[in-house]
């Protein structure tokens, strides 16, 4: 009898618990058993304790639902209620809010984890850069992982065994090895990682977590939120940039995402984009709300609950629940402890972001033209979807793909902007930019943010043979204009329908309020309820005057009309 009770009790305990596996940034796994009603904060605290991490506000836990849609785990809600799949659950620890200045982080363990995240971004094509920058970043990774160059341990061509980017050329590999041999001698892993972070921070796409979408003209684009503001990428060009203090509102309705902003001289703009699914649009909106609160606000007490849509439309409500960047920096400055020991991954191969590849090096495609291009973010996102450890971007199963095909192939170049990937961006993939008049102004602002001397677009325009928007006549401008006009007419029709729907909802709300007031009036005048507040209302002189001068005559008139209608029906 006692044994059966013990067994039944243990079964009940097992039913109340489930297993969670979290893949960390060094591709190791942390598995634990937690209560079924445990919240996300409990799991996050377990992981941070396991990593001995105190500056934890920059990180988050990401998971993918059965529909391949990415989500950030909300720490204030139950884990089991957020997951749409059955346990055991598999999640990933990732950098959620990139530090505006990684070098200012207090502890080395935090810088190391951010280093692993940016290294992953570089491998998956999310961090775009010129060849000169790419070679330097890769050399820093080599120095951090294998130390100084040793002819006895590192034979000729040793850098070709490392995979830093989606694809790269032999010339780039030779340049990486040259920098590692000559310029980084004596640097410790800590110093190499810090230099890597400082270099990556200056790039325009630092901190980019791309969300695939389409603009109003149907052109593929990627939206992202960075420590400095909101950006729009088309191909490998940053076509829009809005500082966080310029963004006034983020809103979504179904698959439509709107960004409202005030630029210089009180010029208001609205950017509109379309995501593949409503779930992707909601995820984009929540990411935007969290990033805006984290980077823009001075104190977490200023955080407010935001709604996803206008008045009279049913929408989602969401509130950022963590600390803001300024508070995190102030709290980090108070940390006083012995630096924790860091167990670096070294040469352990990784499934999603490998340092060493044991297979053959990705060979370069046969080149027919010598052109200089940047890393293609489109190609990087293709590898991102196929990665086992990096949560995938939702792929399209209907209609047009969000990833345009490459129209040219890359090749080695003798100048400073050589090829990194074998795919290049062609303006024919994105004929018209998103219609914002301050295009040139935004490019100037983007250069001021990270100190770049030339923007991505200027680098592209300097390439020989790169087609411009003026060359697009061969693709049929007349048909394009007609299609855009048709889309504009459709958009106007949708706006009219939304306005009519809003008016109808306002009318229904008004009728409902009048009906409630009528019921309250009947209760006041006709019922015998002896409730304190009703009794006080009935005893007021104004109510007595209304009752005898207006309500009683109106009641007699209605009674007379009802008797007359009843007599007509009886006579028939």
Image: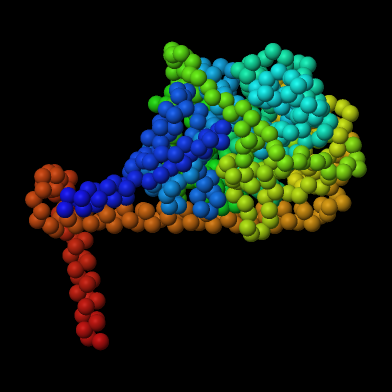
x, y percent for residue 80:
39, 47
Report whether residue 131 is seen.
no
Above or below: residue 333 compared with residue 535: above
List the single residue furthest toward the front: 152
Whether residue 429 is visible here, answered yes or no, is yes
User: Which one is nearer the viewer's eye here, 94 or 431?
Assistant: 94
Front position in the image: 173 or 107: 173
- Identity of the residue drawn at 66% across and 59% down: 399
Q: Is residue 169 above or below residue 453?
A: below
- Going by the image, does 539 lie left or right of 279? left
Q: Position of residue 230 (x, y in %)?
A: 60, 34
* Residue found at x 77% / y 53%: 481
Judged from this view, the residue extending furthest toward the bottom is: 572
State left or right for residue 117 relative to residue 56.
right
Q: Position of residue 322 (x, y in %)?
A: 43, 30
Image side of residue 520 versus residue 434, left or right: left
Report how many numbered discs are placed on residues in the image: 0
Q: Nearer the viewer, residue 170 or 533?
A: 170
For the point 52% across and 27% down, which residue is it? 295
Residue drawn at point x = 66 percent, y = 32 percent: 355
Instruction: Indicate how the structure is coloured in the image.
Output: rainbow
**Considering the image in quadrants, where does the C terminus appear?**
bottom left
Of 291 and 60, nearer the camera is 60
Residue 395 on image: x %, y %: 62, 51
């Amino acid at each position: 009898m006692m044994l059966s009770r013990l067994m039944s009790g243990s079964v009940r305990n097992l039913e109340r618990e489930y297993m969670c596996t979290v893949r960390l940034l060094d591709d190791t796994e942390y598995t634990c058993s937690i209560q079924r009603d445990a919240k996300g904060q409990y799991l996050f605290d377990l992981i941070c304790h396991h990593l001995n991490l105190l500056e934890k506000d920059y990180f988050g836990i990401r998971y993918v639902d059965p529909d391949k849609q990415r989500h950030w785990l909300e720490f204030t809600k139950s884990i089991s209620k957020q997951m749409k799949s059955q346990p055991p659950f598999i999640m990933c620890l990732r950098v959620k809010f990139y530090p505006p200045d990684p070098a200012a982080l207090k502890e080395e363990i935090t810088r190391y984890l951010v280093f692993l995240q940016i290294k992953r971004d570089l491998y998956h094509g999310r961090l775009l850069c010129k060849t000169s920058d790419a070679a330097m970043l890769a050399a820093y990774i080599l120095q951090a992982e294998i130390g100084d160059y040793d002819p006895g341990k590192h034979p000729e061509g040793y850098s070709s065994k490392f995979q830093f980017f989606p694809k790269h050329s032999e010339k780039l590999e030779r340049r990486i090895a040259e920098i590692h041999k000559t310029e980084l001698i004596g640097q410790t892993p800590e110093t190499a990682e810090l230099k890597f972070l400082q270099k990556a921070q200056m790039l325009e796409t630092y901190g980019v977590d791309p969300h695939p979408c389409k603009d109003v003209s149907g052109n593929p684009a990627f939206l992202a939120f960075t420590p400095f503001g909101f950006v729009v990428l088309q191909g490998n060009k940053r076509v829009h940039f809005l500082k966080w203090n310029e963004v006034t509102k983020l809103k979504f309705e179904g698959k439509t995402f709107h960004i409202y902003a005030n630029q210089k001289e009180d010029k208001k703009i609205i950017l509109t984009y379309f995501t593949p699914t409503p779930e992707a649009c909601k995820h984009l909106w929540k990411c935007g709300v969290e990033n805006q609160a984290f980077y823009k606000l001075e104190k977490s007490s200023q955080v407010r609950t935001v709604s996803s849509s206008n008045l009279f439309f049913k929408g989602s409500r969401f509130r950022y629940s963590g600390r803001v960047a300024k508070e995190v920096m102030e709290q980090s400055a108070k940390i006083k402890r012995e630096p924790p020991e860091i167990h670096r991954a070294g040469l352990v191969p990784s499934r999603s972001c490998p340092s060493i590849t044991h297979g053959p090096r990705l060979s370069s495609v046969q080149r027919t033209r010598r052109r200089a291009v940047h890393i293609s973010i489109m190609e990087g996102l293709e590898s991102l979807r196929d990665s086992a450890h990096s949560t995938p971007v939702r792929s399209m199963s209907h209609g047009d793909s969000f990833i345009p095909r490459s129209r040219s192939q890359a090749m080695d170049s003798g100048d400073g902007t050589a090829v990194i990937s074998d795919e290049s961006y062609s303006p024919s993939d994105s004929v018209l930019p998103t219609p914002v008049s301050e295009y040139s102004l935004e490019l100037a602002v983007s250069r001021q943010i990270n100190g770049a001397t030339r923007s991505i677009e200027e680098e592209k325009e300097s390439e020989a043979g790169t087609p411009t928007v003026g060359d697009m006549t061969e693709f049929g401008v007349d048909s394009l204009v007609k299609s855009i006009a048709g889309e504009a007419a459709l958009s106007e029709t949708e706006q009219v329908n939304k306005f009519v729907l809003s008016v109808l909802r306002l009318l229904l709300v008004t009728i409902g309020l009048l009906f409630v007031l009528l019921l309250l009036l009947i209760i006041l005048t006709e019922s015998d309820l002896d409730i304190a507040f009703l009794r006080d209302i009935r005893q007021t002189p104004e109510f007595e005057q209304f009752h005898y001068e207006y309500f009683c005559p109106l009641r007699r008139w209605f009674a007379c009309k009802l008797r007359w209608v009843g007599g007509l029906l009886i006579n028939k």
